[in-house]
Amino acid sequence: MPDLITVPEDFASQSLERLQIRVFKSVEDAREPWLAFEKTACGYGFQTCAWASALLETVGRDTVVRLAIVLVSDRRRPEPLMLVPLAVCRRHGLARLEFIDFGLADYNAPLIDRTFALALAEGGFPALWRRILAAVGPVDTIHLSNLPESIGGVPNPFLQLPCRPSAMSYHTVLDGGFEGFLKARSTRLMADTRTKRRRLERQGQVAFQVIGDAGEVDRAIDALIEQKSRRYQFIGAVDIFLNPDFRDFYRNIAKCEVSSGFVHLSVLTLDDRIVAVHLGIVFQDRMYMLMPAFDLDRFAAVSPGRLLLLEMVRWCCDHGVRVFDFTTGNEQYKSDWTDRTMAIHVFDQGVSARGRVLIRGQAVYRRFKARYPGLVQKLKAIRVKLLNRGW
């Protein structure tokens, strides 16, 4: 396997030699150290054992060729230093190494010990990455998407690879509490929000509820799927819920994890009718806004999704959640509610001869897309219509 990048001279070779790399081929084999490491590591909720397990049991069950859950530790002590949940998947007829993602993780990064991350920041990760690849085994391509700049305040070592920028994410820090959050928003936005709240309240009793019992999940998830599918159709996007595996993923992870608090499922109701719903996750001190939906046909004029968002922020402030993360995507409303951004990157590598041909072809397409954005957008719209019709 070819080298990806030159090893910096200032990285002590003896430090690399002390590292031990284990590759687990199943979640069950990795579960015990994985769950223990989640409690102390810097990381994102998308690399937790619960999230990865739910993905592999639904969306990824027919895609994965083999798992490669990488655990890095020091030979002198048993505690993990880094865990990278990877999978080799069949893509375009080739074996591609990627995070356990399947398009549903907004951030892909390792779970990593803070001190180890700071040590790697000196430039030692590319050499370690080559050792990881050797342990994982042969692949045709490598595609690591949605790589954030930092992980819990420490640099993401994967950005030492030759990445390219791909997106932005948006979040706000809630150190000033709920009142501080409101004061940081525009006067016009908050006045409009209060008006819409009053208009909704004139139609009946408005209530916010956090679903905490698995027995209450189905009603909320049914509303989520119905409302989100309608939204996808309205904006001309692919409706992921046409695929039953995606429906199963959100329903299953909600039923398994609402009681633990990892999944945050909440609704805004009008006389017990769900007018807005949201499924997200809470990991460490961060709430991830993942799947918001609202009744587009009957209540769009009063922005129930925005009203639910405010209740979720209030809940976070009351429960010690420090960061409200709107994750990736360039939706206009995110700039109204956030004050911080983070660049997101992607890393692609062709390893085999066929893999290098594919990666070069993808680079050509990106250049074509940048040169002819209007044409590409029209072709994309046609593709979306065909997919939504089941073609």
Image: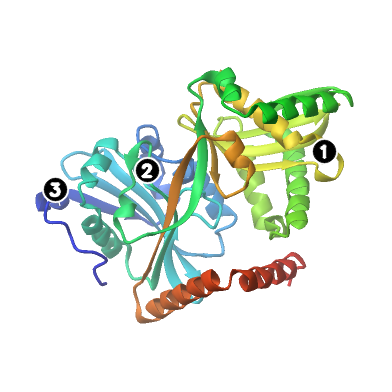
Residue name at image x 53 percent, y 54 percent: 56
Disc 1, SS: helix
Residue 162, quarter of the rendered image: bottom left
User: In this figure, which residue is indicated by the disc labeled 1?
Assistant: 301
The numbered mark, 2 or 3, whose residue comes first in the sequence reads: 3
Q: Nearer the viewer, mark 2 or mark 3?
A: 2
Q: Nearer the viewer, residue 281 or 323?
A: 323
In the visual, does 91 lie left or right of 153? right
Which residue is label 3 attached to? 15
Q: Is residue 240 left or right of residue 348?
A: right
| Structural crowding at the residue carrying mark 2, measured as other residues with C-alpha within 10 Å and reported as few (<14), some (14–19) or many (≥20) | some
**Mark 2 — residue?**
150
Q: Earlier in the sequence, mark 1 or mark 3?
A: 3
Depth check: give the residue in front, 183 or 40: 183
In the rendered structure, the answer to whether residue 139 lies left or right of residue 116 reads right
Q: Would you say the residues marked 1 and 2 are in contact, meaning their CB atoms lie under 8 Å apart? A: no
Q: Secondary structure at mark 2?
A: strand
Measured as percent of width and height from the top left, residue 54 is found at: 55, 48
